[in-house]
Image (cartoon, rainbow, N blue to C red):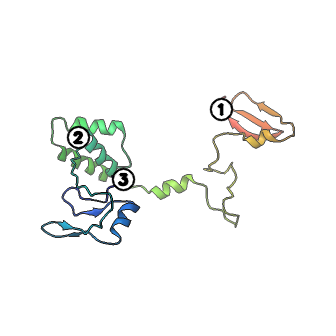
Amino acid sequence: KVPLARSYDMNEWELSAGIVAISTFEGKEILCYDQGCQIDLPNIENGEYHLTSSIYTLSLRNEYARFLETASYGIRAADLDNLEAATVNHESLPVITSFIQSQMDVNISSHREFWRSRSNPRASYPLKAGIPNHPCDEMSRWRLFTFIRDDASSFLPKTIRVVGNGPYKLYLDGHLATSVEDF
């Protein structure tokens, strides 16, 4: 069974997603009026159409999760628990209204500013695309490990030397590779 069209929450009918629905209707539209909707369905060989109905409900906790998903930058279990606890003996609307107001009262911040301050800065002179800046530059972003497979795959002998008592400096073939607080 492949869904071709759907209607939910008393909305007008619409095509379902996918190539089967699109190719079945071949550009025909579902026409909706005050009394109902209509579509001319093509004849299908060795098959039949079915009109089904289903009821979809969410638990109150899932409704709160859906609300928090759309009203914030994602949900945390603690936020969901707090919202659920706040509505145990109260109606939901005042609690949700209060939550929205508290979010609007927070000083605004710029996501772009936050991201740019933590991303690699622009080069002040032309470079090939994708060439990063120096790893020691402030706020630069690099891999989370020091050595890569190419460091060990060479036929040349490799020497790793550790200097210090914390922070430790690791040298690979006499070149400083990284500085770490602990192993």
The amino acid on which the numbered mark 3 sits, given as a three-letter code, is: Asn
The amino acid on which the numbered mark 2 sits, given as a three-letter code, is: Leu
* Distance of label 2 from label 3 (alpha carbons): 30 Å
Residue assigned mark 3: 107
Q: Residue at x 35, y 70 (%)?
A: 26
Q: Position of residue 3 (x, y in %)?
A: 32, 56
For label 3, the SS is loop
Q: Position of residue 24 (x, y in %)?
A: 35, 65
Q: Residue at x 30, y 72 (%)?
A: 28
For the C terminus, the quadrant is top right
Q: Residue furthest front?
A: 46
Q: Residues within 10 Å of mark 2 (few under 14, many from 20)?
A: few
- The numbered mark at residue 181 is 1
Q: First in sequence, mark 1 or 3: give its number.
A: 3
Q: Position of residue 70 (x, y in %)?
A: 32, 51
Side (left or right) of 54 relative to 147: left
Residue assigned mark 2: 60
